[in-house]
C-alpha cells in the first residue's frame, strides 16, 4: 500500500510554515490526539470513551515501549512475554530502562491459549524466587510472529493474572487493523482490543496500557509515529511527559497522520484494500506450502506473515551422539541474557545450514531462532510484498527446498 499512501499524501498535503515549528510541544499536537481518540473510539470499541488527554504521541512504538519500561521498571527488573516473540522488545525495554525481558515457554501447549497464563504464573514465581521483580507483561495483540488473535477469555485471564500480582499489562496492538479473512480461516479468532474489555472485577484500570503506531496498519514504519494510551493512569502519563522531548514526533509526521485519520472515506477504503491484499497474499503462500507438503500454524488471520513449519524438511530436533545420549547445549537467544534454555546443537546447525542456502539463493525468510522459538525449524514467511516479488521469493525458496531434500535423501 506504499504507492497508494504516497499518492494520497502528495495530493492531499501541503507543508505550511506552522509545520516547521515545534507545534504544540512534545506530547503530540492537539489535532493528532483528537484524531487518534476518535479513531480508537470508532475502530477499537472501547468500553470507556478514549479522550485526547489519555494519549501521548511518540516517535514510534519502539519509543512507547522504551518509555513505559523506563516508567514502570527499575534496572534489573523483569517483564514477561510469551514465546515465540518479537525479540526487538528485549532492546526496547533494556537499552535505557535496564529492564530484562523474560520469555515464557508454552510447555508444549498453544501459546495463544488461556492455559498459557499458567506458564506466566510459573515463570513469574521462578524469577521472583531468583530475586527478580516482575513489573509487567507484554502482549503482542495480534501476535507477531504467529499472526493470530487472542480470545476474549484469554485476554481476561491475563488481566486477572496481572491484577493478582499488581503488575502492568502492556498491549501492543500495532496490527489491529491488519486482520483479514480467507476461505481457509473463516473460523479464526477475530481481534479484540484490550480497550473493549470491561476491567471491572478483572484488573485495576490503571495497570492497562495500549500501544499503537503508523508502522504496520498504516504502512509507515519510516514515518516514526506512535501513541501510548493509558486511560486510568494520569500519573504515569505525567511521568512520561517529563522525558517526552526525547521521543518527540515531528510536526510534519503528526500532520500526515492527522490528515489520514480524519479522512474516513479514504481510511475505510485503505483498510478494506489492505485486508484484501493481505488475504490474497496469505492464500497464495498457503497454496504454495501445500504444494511443497509443508505445514503452517492454521487459524492465522492478522499481520503480514505466517508461521511455517519446516521441521519435516530439516529433520528431527534432537540427535543421539556416539555415547547414546541426547546432545544438547545451552544457548541464549537474547542479547541481554534473560533466560537460558536447552536446544539441540544439531537442530541449530541445520537451521544455520538452511539459512546459508537461502542467502546463496538470494531469498530471505526469518528463522524461528530470531523469534526465540521453542523448536528449531519454524520460519516466518512475510507475504505483504508485491506479487512479483512474492512469486520470485517462493520460486527461489522452492529451489532451496529441492536441494535440501535431495541432500537429505528425500526427507
Image: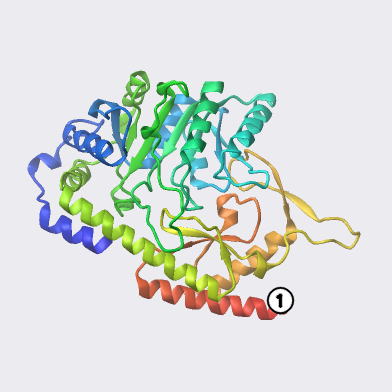
Q: How many marks?
A: 1
* Along the viewing direction, whichever of 182 and 55 lies nearer the viewer: 182
In the image, residue 198 sits, relative to residue 138, either above or below, namely above
* Along the viewing direction, whichever of 355 and 293 lies nearer the viewer: 293
Percent position of residue 73, x then y: 50, 26
Color theme of the render: rainbow
Percent position of residue 161, x then y: 55, 27
Task: Check the picture and name the quadrant holding the C terminus.
Answer: bottom right
When asked about the image quadrant of residue 133, the answer is top right
In the image, residue 193 sits, relative to residue 129, either above or below, namely below
Outermost residue on the right side: it is 323
Q: Residue at x 91, y 59 (%)?
A: 323
When asked about the image quadrant of residue 199, the answer is top left
Write down the residue under mark 1. 408
Outermost residue on the top side: it is 235
Q: Rate crowding at label 1 as few (under 14), some (14 to 19) or many (20 or more) other CA atoms within 10 Å.
A: few
When asked about the image quadrant of residue 239, the answer is top left
Q: Secondary structure at mark 1?
A: loop
In the image, residue 361 sits, relative to residue 113, either above or below, namely below
Q: Is residue 98 visible?
A: no
Q: Residue at x 11, y 54 (%)?
A: 12
Q: Residue at x 52, y 32 (%)?
A: 158
Amino acid at each position: 500500500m506504499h504507492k497508494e499512501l504516497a499518492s494520497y499524501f502528495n495530493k492531499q498535503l501541503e507543508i505550511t510554515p506552522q509545520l516547521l515549528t515545534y507545534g504544540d510541544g512534545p506530547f503530540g499536537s492537539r489535532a493528532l490526539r483528537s484524531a487518534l481518540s476518535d479513531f480508537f473510539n470508532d475502530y477499537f470499541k472501547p468500553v470507556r470513551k478514549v479522550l485526547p488527554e489519555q494519549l501521548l504521541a511518540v516517535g514510534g512504538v519502539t519509543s512507547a515501549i522504551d518509555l513505559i519500561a523506563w516508567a514502570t521498571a527499575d534496572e534489573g527488573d523483569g517483564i514477561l512475554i510469551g514465546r515465540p516473540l518479537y525479540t526487538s522488545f528485549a532492546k526496547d525495554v533494556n537499552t535505557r530502562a535496564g529492564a530484562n525481558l523474560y520469555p515464557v515457554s508454552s510447555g508444549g501447549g498453544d501459546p495463544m491459549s488461556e492455559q498459557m497464563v499458567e506458564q506466566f504464573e510459573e515463570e513469574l514465581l521462578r524469577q521472583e524466587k531468583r530475586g527478580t521483580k516482575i513489573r509487567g507483561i507484554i502482549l503482542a495483540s495480534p501476535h507477531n510472529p504467529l499472526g493470530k488473535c487472542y480470545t476474549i477469555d484469554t485476554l481476561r485471564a491475563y488481566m486477572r493474572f496481572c491484577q493478582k500480582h499488581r503488575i502492568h499489562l502492556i498491549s501492543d496492538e500495532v496490527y489491529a487493523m491488519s486482520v483479514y479473512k480467507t476461505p481457509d480461516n473463516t473460523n479464526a479468532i477475530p481481534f479484540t482490543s484490550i480497550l473493549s474489555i470491561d476491567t471491572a472485577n478483572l484488573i485495576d484500570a490503571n495497570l492497562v496500557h495500549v500501544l499503537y503506531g503508523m508502522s504496520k496498519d498504516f504502512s509507515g514504519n519510516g514515518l516514526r509515529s506512535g501513541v501510548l494510551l493509558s486511560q486510568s493512569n494520569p500519573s504515569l502519563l505525567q511521568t512520561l511527559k517529563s522525558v517526552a522531548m526525547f521521543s518527540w514526533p515531528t510536526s510534519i509526521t503528526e500532520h500526515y497522520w492527522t490528515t489520514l485519520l480524519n479522512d474516513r472515506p479514504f481510511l475505510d477504503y485503505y483498510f478494506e484494500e489492505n485486508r484484501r491484499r493481505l488475504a490474497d497474499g496469505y492464500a497464495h503462500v498457503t497454496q504454495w506450502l501445500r504444494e511443497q507438503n509443508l505445514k503452517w500454524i492454521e487459524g492465522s488471520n492478522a499481520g503480514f506473515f505466517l508461521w511455517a513449519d519446516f521441521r519435516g524438511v530439516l529433520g528431527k530436533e534432537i540427535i543421539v551422539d556416539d555415547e547414546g545420549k541426547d546432545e544438547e547445549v545451552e544457548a541464549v537467544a537474547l542479547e541481554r541474557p534473560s533466560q537460558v534454555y536447552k536446544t539441540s546443537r544439531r537442530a541449530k546447525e541445520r537451521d544455520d545450514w538452511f539459512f546459508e542456502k537461502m542467502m546463496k539463493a538470494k531469498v530471505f525468510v526469518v528463522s524461528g531462532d530470531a523469534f526465540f522459538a521453542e523448536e528449531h525449524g519454524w520460519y516466518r514467511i512475510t507475504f505483504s510484498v508485491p506479487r512479483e516479488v512474492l512469486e520470485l521469493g517462493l520460486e527461489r525458496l522452492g529451489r532451496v527446498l529441492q536441494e535440501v531434500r535431495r541432500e537429505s535423501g528425500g526427507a
